[in-house]
Amino acid sequence: MPFHSSMTDTTATALRRLDATRLDAPFRGLLALDAAVALGDGIAITRSEVPVTRFFDLETGEALGEVAGTTAPEDALRLALWDALSDGPVAFHRRRELAPLVHFPDAMEEVVVLRDGLVVARGQTEKDPLYVLMLHT
């Protein structure tokens, strides 16, 4: 099984242990994709080259849902607030939640969520190069 170089040894080892015959097709497919993966308390979160972040039940391989846009799977697993970037509005989510807490209408090039809901983001145009937002949770 090929694994992306950004995967940790622990993640790669855990994925090798999965019984691929029990997994739904989307989860089996991630083993061959160039994907980023995070594993946590009964959940696997993946991001592939397409701008979609997917959530799977780690025990059964069942797809729990997906979020349009890209995020670091590790962020969705551990951060209290995380973002999903796409060509459209940026979506902000609570830890491990598929439904967004809020959308910000502008597309962003990069977003950093700091503590207590403070967000610093770089816009996609020179006109709007920097945003500072406060998310109230």
Image (tube, rainbow, N blue to C red):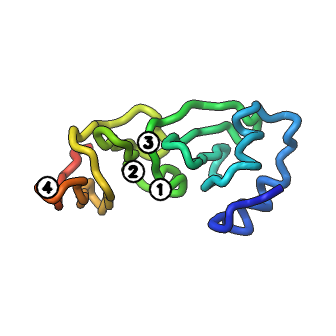
Horizontal side of 23 relative to 117 (left or right) equals right
Q: Secondary structure at mark 2?
A: strand
CA neighbours of label 1 inside 10 A, class few (<14), some (14 to 19), many (20+): some
Q: Earlier in the sequence, mark 1 or mark 2?
A: 1
Task: Give amino acid for label 1.
Answer: Asp
Q: Earlier in the sequence, mark 3 or mark 4?
A: 3
Quadrant of the image occupied by residue 2: bottom right
Q: Position of residue 23 (x, y in %)?
A: 79, 35
Q: CA distance from mark 1 to mark 3?
A: 13 Å
In the image, 96 versus 106, the foreground residue is 106
Residue 7: x percent and y percent?
A: 66, 64
Q: Residue at x 19, y 52 (%)?
A: 134
Residue under pointer 2: 82
Query: Circle 4 is placed at which residue position?
Result: 128
- The quadrant of the picture occupied by the C terminus is top left
Residue 75 numbered mark, or none: 1
Asked whether the residues under the numbered discs 2 and 3 touch, taking CB atoms below 8 Å apart as contact, a structural biologist would say: no
Which residue occupies 59% across, 46% down? 45
Q: Position of residue 78 (x, y in %)?
A: 49, 56
Tell me which amino acid carries mark 2. Trp
Q: Amino acid at mark 3?
A: Gly
Q: Which dot marks residue 120?
A: none
Which is nearer the eye, 7 or 10? 7
Q: Circle 4: is it few (<14), some (14-19), or many (20+) Cα within 10 Å? A: few
